[in-house]
Image: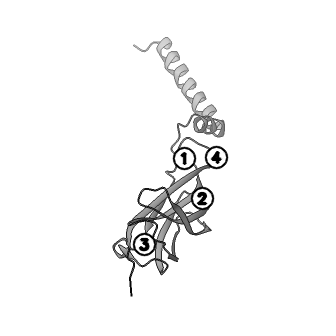
Amino acid sequence: MISWRRIGLCGGIGVLVAAIFIGGYAHRALIVRRLDTWKLLPRPERLTELYFDNITGLPTKITPATPQPVGFVVRNLEARTVEYHYVLRVASLDGKIVRELGNGSFRLEANHTLTTTSAVAIPALSRRVQVQVRLRYGSIPWGYNAPVTEVQQINFWAVPVIRTP
């Protein structure tokens, strides 16, 4: 036997669920904004790739004051256009002497890649030198709403060869 009381309870629960569903849909933007504020919604993974364009072709021996090509690649996966600033440097073996060889900047759209090659004259600061590419840019890490300054660096070692006549 069907009880009217049971039907009333089931109907009341159904009306309550429908009201929550309709009310939630009507205030969807507010709910989404609140969940985003609480960092409960998925966000894109933002990153920048920095690497040498020809890792096997990097010079292991250099002639000081002779221009050497240094090429590197930047791939923007930050999900937005980013302004990048780079500095080419050379450091002595102990890191106490650092000299700037060149610098530059460029703007890169999301999901684009740029290859940059510069010819730099690497001085003989010590018996072994480290050639560095330092990249600075504004990135939005997970959990942040505004860009913060990020710095990446790649380097390789080379031995200066001084030729005597």
| First of labels 4, 3 by sequence position | 3
| First of labels 3, 1 by sequence position | 3
Which label was assigned to residue 80? 2
Res. 118 visible in picture: no
Mark 1, residues whose alpha carbon is within 10 Å: few (<14), some, or many (≥20)?
some
For the point 42% across and 79% down, the residue is: 63
Res. 136 visible in picture: yes
For the point 43% across and 15% down, the residue is: 2
Mark 2, residues whose alpha carbon is within 10 Å: few (<14), some, or many (≥20)?
few
Q: Amino acid at mark 4?
A: Ala
The x, y position of residue 43, in whole percent, is 52, 46
Marks 2,4: beta carbons within 8 A: no
Q: Which residue is mark 1?
A: 141
**Disc 4/disc 3 C-alpha distance (Å):** 31 Å
For the point 46% across and 56% down, the residue is: 95
Q: Amino acid at mark 2?
A: Arg
Q: Which residue is mark 4?
A: 146
**Disc 4/disc 1 C-alpha distance (Å):** 8 Å
Identify the element where label 4 is drawn: loop
Q: Amino acid at mark 3?
A: Asp
| First of labels 2, 4 by sequence position | 2
Q: Amino acid at mark 1?
A: Pro
The x, y position of residue 157, in whole percent, is 38, 66
Which label was assigned to residue 53? 3
Give the vertical position of 150 relative to 16 (above or below).
below
Marks 4,1: beta carbons within 8 A: no
In the rendered image, the quadrant that contains the N terminus is top left
